Image: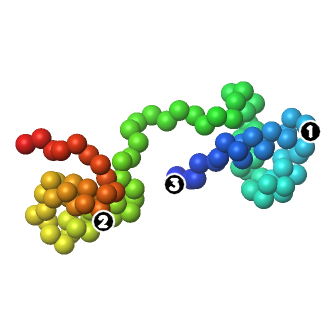
């Protein structure tokens, strides 16, 4: 299954209308989102008692997908490119800040 967009906390709060007796269909029409999205949020609220997103394990990614594609492109052009050269290139474009590589 592919990744999906994170639902904003503001949107999650707006789905709280289910407490007042509004149907899932009415909420989804009002917010212009799929019925299944509203249903998922309501079910999670009933189960956990909160609308906060769940904790995610693992380290967050440092580079954006665009930066990763740039690095792959550079290495495909010149396969002998070193990690030091790639870090230097990223720092020059001020996209990425990293401590110096130890030698």
Q: Where residue 10 sits: x, y (%)?
A: 70, 45
Residue 45 in which image quadrant? top right
> Dot 1, how many residues are within 10 Å of its Cα: few (below 14), some (14-19), or many (20+)?
few
> Dot 3, how many residues are within 10 Å of its Cα: few (below 14), some (14-19), or many (20+)?
few
Residue found at the very far bottom of the displayed protein = 77
Q: Are marks 3 and 1 in contact (CB under 8 Å)?
A: no
User: Which residue occupies 78% across, 43% down?
Assistant: 15
In this view, 91 is above or below 98: below
Q: Tell me which label, 1 or 2, sits earlier in the chain.
A: 1
Residue 18 placement, left or right of 61: right
Q: Tell me which label, 3 or 1, sits earlier in the chain.
A: 3
CA–CA distance in space, label 3 to label 1: 33 Å
Q: Which quadrant is home to the C terminus?
A: top left
Q: Where residue 96 sits: x, y (%)?
A: 31, 53
CA–CA distance in space, label 2 to label 3: 22 Å
CA–CA distance in space, label 1 to label 2: 50 Å
User: Which residue occupies 39% across, 56% down?
Assistant: 64
Residue 73 makes an appearance in the image = yes
In this view, 40 is above or below 2: above
Return the residue nearer the eye: 78 or 84: 84
The residue indicated by pointer 3 is: 2
Return the residue nearer the eye: 13 or 18: 13
Q: Secondary structure at mark 1?
A: loop
Residue 100 placement, left or right of 3: left
The residue indicated by pointer 1 is: 21
Q: Which mark is residue 70?
A: 2
Return the residue nearer the eye: 33 or 88: 88
């Amino acid at each position: 299954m592919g990744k999906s967009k994170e639902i904003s906390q503001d949107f999650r709060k707006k789905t709280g209308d289910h407490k007042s007796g509004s149907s899932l269909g009415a909420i989804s029409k009002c917010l212009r989102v799929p019925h299944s999205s509203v249903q998922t949020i309501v079910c999670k609220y009933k189960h956990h008692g909160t609308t906060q997103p769940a904790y995610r394990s693992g380290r967050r990614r440092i580079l954006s997908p665009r930066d990763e594609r740039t690095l792959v492109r550079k290495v495909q052009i010149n396969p002998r490119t070193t990690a030091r050269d790639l870090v230097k290139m990223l720092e020059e474009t001020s996209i990425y800040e990293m401590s110096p590589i130890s030698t």
